[in-house]
Image (cartoon, rainbow, N blue to C red):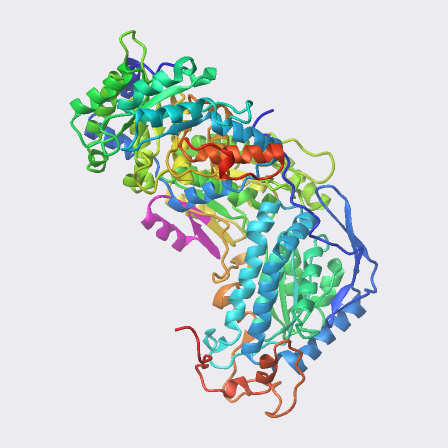
Amino acid sequence: MSFLEYAPAPESRAILSLREQYGLFIDGQFVDGRGTPFQTISPATEERLATVASANDADVDVAVAAARRAYDRIWSRMSGRDRGKYLFRIARLVQERARELAVAESLDNGKPIKESRDVDVPLVAAWFFYYAGWADKLDHAGLGANPRALGVAAQVIPWNFPLLMLAWKIAPALAAGNTVVLKPAETTPLSALIFAEILQQAELPPGVVNIITGAGDTGAALVSHDGVDKVAFTGSTAVGRAIAKQVAGTDKKVTLELGGKAANIVFDDAPIDQAIEGIVNGIFFNQGHVCCAGSRLLVQENVHDEVVERLKLRLATLRMGDPLDKNTDIGAINSREQLERIRELSDVGVAEGAERWSAPCEIPENGFWYAPTIFTNVQTSSRIAREEIFGPVLSVLTFRTPAEAIAKANNTPYGLSAGIWTDKGSRILAVADQLRAGVVWANTFNRFDPASPFGGYKESGYGREGGRHGLAAYLAPTAIGQSAEPHRVAPGTHVPIESADPAAASETHSDARSEPRPATTKKGGAK
Amino acid sequence: MSGTSLVTARERALAVLGGEPDDATLRRYLHGIAGVDAVGLEQRAAGLGTRSIKTTSKRRALDTIISLIDLTTLEGADTPGKVRSLVAKAVNPDPADATTPRVAAVCVYGDMVPFAVDALGAAHGDPDAGLISVAAVATAFPSGRASLDVKLADTAEAVAAGADEIDMVIDRGAFLAGRYGLVFDQIAAVKEACRRPDGSSASLKVILETGELATYDNVRRASWLAILAGGDFIKTSTGKVQPAATLPVTLLMLEVVRDWHLATGQRIGVKPAGGIRASKDAIKYLVTVAETVGEEWLQPHLFRFGASSLLNDVLLQRQKMSTGHYSGADYVTID
C-alpha cells in the first residue's frame, strides 16, 4: 500500500440530524408548502437526504406579506444598534454550529468538506459579523445622512455556495433595515433550512427573514411579486436577463451577479510554483462551480509548455471522491444536469480541435463526477474559451505581450474577475488598471473578504456585494425634505419587540436617530 | 552509501550554469530563477498541513518518521556517556516494543564520532539497509565563522573517525554579501574533504540556516547553490537559530529538489532540522514530501528529520495506537 493512499478520514455525519421533511420558513415558523414537494439528494451518492416543500404562488404571497408586516411593524422601526445585535447573534450561532453546517453543505452540494469547513462556513460567519458592524453606521455608507431601507427584498441564490450566497444576500439586507424572502436553489436547500433553525434560535422577529424552497417557477413568482421592493439574484446570465426584463418598468431595485469567464494571466516572471497553485485554486476550487472561476488561463507563450507540464503534475496529485472525506480535493458535480452541460461543452472543445487532458482519477460508480480537465491548443474563437462551463475544465490560451494579454482578457461578454501573476509590482498595477473585471486578484485567486466589494461588468451583472458598496444595493439616499424614516411611528408609541435581551428591547423604544452621535459607550470598560 | 563524485558534480554545475561558477555567473543564474510568493507558499504549506492521516496511514507514518530521524545531540556539555546513551536509544527506541524501527542516524559533534561508532558496533552502517549511520556536524558548526583550512580539517577528521555523513554549514555572511562563488567553492572543497582513502565519500548535507537567510527567495537561491556545488542533501537549520525548520521553508526546498530532479535526473535529499517536536507536525512534513516530490523520497537517503525530542512523541503516539490509550512521559525513555 502506498503512503499516498491515505486511509479514509470521513467527517462524521452524527452531528447533523436532518428531518425527514422540511417545510417553508415563513413568519418564523416552518409551514407546509402548497406546491409538490421535491427531494434533495447527495450528488456524490444520489442518496435521498430529505423531502423539501415547494412554494406555489399563494405561498409566495404569504411569505411576502409576512416580510412586509415584519418590515412595517418591527424591523424598519428598530434601531440600527439592535439590528446589529441580532446579526452578531446569528454570526455567533453560525460559528457554534459550524461543523453541522459544513457537513450539511458538503452532503447536499457535493463540495469537499475541507472547503465547506475552511472556506464557506467561516466566510458566512465573517459576513454576518461584518454587516452587523454596519447596522448602526449607515450614515457613513456614502449615501448621505439617514439613508433608508428599501423594504422587502426578494433574493434568489444559486447552488454553488448555498450558505455563503445566503449570507451575502441576507447580512447586508438586514443590516440596512430590509426584510427578506429568500429562495435557495432547488438542488441545495438544506443549509438554508438549517439556517432558518438558527434564526429561530437567535429569536429573530418572525417574518424578518422568510425562506421558501422550490424550483425556478417559485423564484419567478417571487421576483415578479408586486409586494417586493428589491430583487437580488445570483445565478446564470440567462435567468438574470429574464429577471431584468421582468422587473423593467417597475420600481424594484435590482442587483444581479451572473456568470463569468475569468482570465487568469500568467506572465513569464511569475512565481511559478505559487502560480500553479493559483491556477488550480482558480478553476478546480469547488469543482469549478464558481462564477468568478479562472476558467481561461492566459499564459505567456515562452513559458506555456513549462506551465502546462507542471500543471499536469500537480493535477495528478488531486484527490477526487467522498466529499465528506477530509482529504478530498475534488468533490462531486452538483447535479446530473450540470454534469451533462460540462460533458457537452468539453466535447465541443474536442470537436473544435483543442487538446483534452484529464487528471487520472478513479471515478466513483454512483453520483456525478468529472475529472479535472485542461484543454490546450484552445483558440480565442473556441466555444470553450467563450462560454461559461461552470465545471472543472480549464482552457489554456497564450499571449506574447502585456497588451495582447489585456486585449484577450477583456475580449469576453463577461467581466466578473481576473487574475494576474507576475513578480513585478508595477506590471500588476498597470494591467489591473486596464482589465474590465469587477475583481482583480494579484498573485492569488478566489480570495474573498466581506470588506471587499464583488460584482461584475457587462454580462456578469450589476451592483456590488460586500463592503460598503454592498450596502448601496439595499439602501436609498434620503432626498432633501423627505422624512428620514417613513415607517417610523411617533416617539412614545409602544412597539412590541421580541428580543431576548431586555436592554435591547428597552432601547428599541427610543428613537435611535434622535440620540446624540457618536454613540456613547458603556462606562466601566477595560482600562 | 556514497555521495556524488566531485568531478561529475562540477561538470554538471558547469553544464547547468553555462560557465565557471564565479560570483557573476552564479548571480546571473540564481537571480534568474523565478521568485517565490511568500503568501502563496505559506498558503500551500498550510493546505498540506490539513491532510488528515488516520488509522493505518498514521501507523505507517509514525514508523516512517522514526526510520527517518537523525537522533541528535549537539550540546557543549556532550560527553562519551551521553553519546552512548543516545546510541542505545537509536538502536532500540522503545524497549517495550521490538517492532519499533531504528532511527536513520545519530548526529553528533565531530569529536564525539569515535564514541558513536564504537557504541553502535554492528548496528553501524547504511540506514537504507536498516542500520544506523553516524552524522557529524562540521565546518565550525553552527556559525561557520572559521577559515577554510579549519573547516576542511574539521571535516576530514570526522570522516577519518568514521562519520558516514557530514552536516556542514554554509557561510551565510558570504551568501548575503553576494559572494556566491566563495560559498560554492567552500561547499565543493568540503565535498572533496568528505572523500575517504578508498575513493568512497561521506554523504554531504549542506545546512543553509534558513533563519538567517530571512527571505524565501534567498532560501531558494541557496538551495540551488548548494546542489550545484555538490551537496547530497540540503538541510534547513542548525537548530541553534530561530526560526529553524518550518513547513513552508521545507516545501520550498522540496520544490527545488523536484525541479533539479526534473532537470538532471539526480535525486537530492532534504533535511528539516530544529523545532519539529510533535508527531502531528512530522506527519505534515511526510505529506508535504509525498505530495511535492513523490513518495519515493520517504527513505533515509532522501529525507531526514533532524530532531531529538520528536522521537519520544512518536513513540507515545505509537504506543497509543497499540494500546488504545495515552501513556505518559515516563513510559518512554530519556536519552
Q: Quadrant of the C terminus of chain B?
A: top left
Q: Quadrant of the N terminus of chain B?
A: top left
Q: In x, y percent, where is residue B304?
A: 42, 27
Please tell me which residue lies in front, A490 or A399.
Answer: A490
Please tell me which residue lies in front, A44 or B47.
Answer: B47
| Above or below, A426 relative to A5 | below
Q: Is residue A425 magenta?
A: yes
Which segment did they paint magenta?
A: A419-442
Tag count in the figure? 0
| Above or below, A266 relative to A412 | above
Q: Quadrant of residue A165?
A: bottom right
Q: In x, y percent, where is residue A499?
A: 64, 77
Please tell me which residue lies in front, A267 or B53.
Answer: B53
Q: In x, y percent, where is residue A323?
A: 65, 43
Q: In x, y percent, where is residue A330?
A: 60, 40
Q: Quadrant of residue A364?
A: top right
Q: Is residue A291 magenta?
A: no
